[in-house]
Amino acid sequence: MAEDDSGLGERRLTADFAAWFGYTRFPPARFFREALIVLDANVLLDLYRITPRARRHVLEAFTSIADRLWVPHQAALEFSRNRKKVVTDRTSSFKQTRQTLRLAEANAIDAIQSAVGELREQRERNGTTRAWDIVAAGLDLASLRARLKGVMDPALSELQTLMDEYDLRPEDMQSVDTLLREIDDLLKGHIGPPYPPAELRTLVEQAHSFRFPNKIPPGFLDVDRKGTPLKAAGDFLLWCQTIDKAILMPGGDRLLILVTKETKGDWWELDDKKRPRAPLPELIQELRDSTGADLLLLSLNDFMKGVREHLSFRVPDQTLDELREVSEDIETLLPDAFRSPSAEPNLLSLTPYEFERLIQYLLIQLGYEVDTQALPFVADLFLLDRRGAETRTVIAEVKRLRGTVGADVVLQLRGALDVTGAEFALLITTGSFTAAAREAAQDAPIELIDGATLVQMLRQVGIRAIF
C-alpha cells in the first residue's frame, strides 16, 4: 500500500533525521541537572570492582540525585545474577597473579637454562675446543637459583597491598554484603517491572529474526558471545525497557542519561582507533521517535566527570583514574569458560571473538600493553612491548582454526608490518604452520606461535586449555 504523503511537505531532514546531523539538542549541563539517570548492570557491578574510597564517591554522587535514578528490570536482573561472580573473579585474579609471580622465578631459570643449552649445542656444532666454564659464568642451576632467589618478593608485596585494599570476599556475598544493602536502599522504588512471559518471548524473537540480522542497535554483536537467545537479547531488552520508561516521563523536554560500561560498536560510533565517539545515530533517533526524549550515553568515568563539572560535586582525580582503569579491567577479557581455576576448555570451542580476547588477556599478562590509540585495521591487535630497554611496537594476528596456516598469511603480516610501521609481529594460531610459512617468517621480525606453544604460554599465566 502506498504511503499517504499528504504531510511530506512538513518533514525536514534536520528534524526527522536529526540524530545524523547532531549528537544532542541540549547542552550537557541540562542533562546533569534535569535528566532521568538510567544505570546499566555493568555500572552497578563496577561498584564491586573498585576500592572503598572510590566506591564512596560514586555512591555519594548517586545519593545526591537519587530521585532521578532508575534501573531497568533487565539491568537489575543481570546485576543480581553476576554480583557474586564479580567478587569471585576478582579474588581468583589475585590468586592467578600470585601464582604467576611465584612461578616467574622458576620460569626465568628454565628460560635461561634453555638458552644456555642452545649455546652449548652451538659450541659443539662449531667444533670448538676452547674451554668455557658454565659455573664460572654463573649460569649453572645452583648459581641461577641463588641469584634469582627472592627477586619477585617486591612484586608479591605489592600484590598483597592491592589485595588488602579490596574489602569484599566471596564468603561475604551471602549474609554480610553491606554494599548490596546500600545499593538496595538507594534503588528502592527505582527499578522497572519485568515483561510478562508472552511479551518477553515476542521481543526476543523480534531481536533475533529482524533487528540483529539487520544490525539494528543495540546488542546485535552479542549474538555469538552469549549462550542463549534470551541472554543475547539482554541489551535489546534493556533498551526496550528504557524506551518504555521514557514514554512515561512528564511532557516538555525529556532528557535521559544512560550510564553504561558498554563500548562495542552496537552502541557507539567508533573512530578509526576503535574508541567510542558518539552513540549510534539509530539509538538517538529511535529514542526521539518513540518517546521524544534526548539521549546522553556515558561511561561511569565520564558521568562522574560531569557530576563534578556540572553539579559541583567533589570527585577526586584519583577516583576518576580508578574508574577509568576499572573500565579497562583485563579480567573482563577472559572468556567465561576459563574463569574456574580447574577449567580446561578446548580453544577451538571459543568463538573468534572470545579467542581474540583470550589472546589479548594472555599478552597483557605477559607484559605487553594494548595500544588502543593506534589500532590498525590490518591486524587484530596493536601492542607496546616495554619489557626491554626500549619500547617496541608489535602487531598480532590471531587465527583460531584446526588446520595449518600457510605462507600467504605470513606474507600478509609482513606487509602489515610495513603499513603500520610496527617493529615486530606475532602470528598466533590454534593450528600449526606449514614449512613454507616458517620459511617465509625466517628472515622477518615475526614470531610464529602454534597451538602447542600457545597452550604452554597460557599455562604460564595460570590458564589451562587444550586444542
Image (tube, helix red, strand yellow):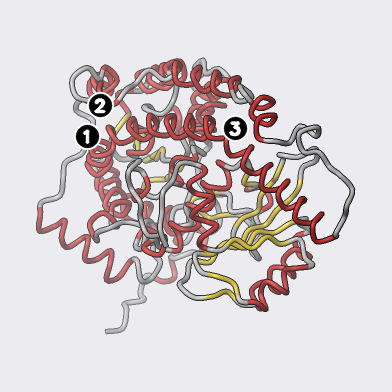
Q: Could you tell me if the residues under marks 3 and 2 are in contact, i.e. CB atoms within 8 Å?
A: no
Give SS at disc 3: helix
Q: Could you tell me if the residues under marks 2 and 1 are in contact, i.e. CB atoms within 8 Å?
A: yes
Instruction: Return the residue at label 1.
Output: 191
Q: Counting other residues with Cα less than 10 Å from the Cα at mark 3, is it few (<14), some (14-19), or many (20 or more)?
A: some
Residue 251 vs residue 364, the one in the foreground: 364
Of the numbered discs in the image, which one, if any, rests on residue 81?
A: none
409 displayed left or right of 132:
left
Q: Amino acid at mark 2?
A: Leu
In the displayed structure, would residue 382 be above or below residue 364? below
Regarding residue 296, the answer to whether it shows in the image is no
Q: Counting other residues with Cα less than 10 Å from the Cα at mark 1, is it few (<14), some (14-19), or many (20 or more)?
A: some
Instruction: State how far apart marks 3 and 2 are (Cα).
Output: 48 Å
State the image coordinates of residue 91 (x, y, percent, origin top left): 38, 29
State the image coordinates of residue 290 (x, y, percent, origin top left): 31, 55
The residue positioned 47% from the left and 70% from the top of the image is 401
Instruction: State how far apart marks 3 and 1 are (Cα).
Output: 51 Å
Query: In terms of sequence position, does the residue under pointer 3 or pointer 2 come before the other?
Result: 3
Q: Quadrant of residue 410?
A: bottom right
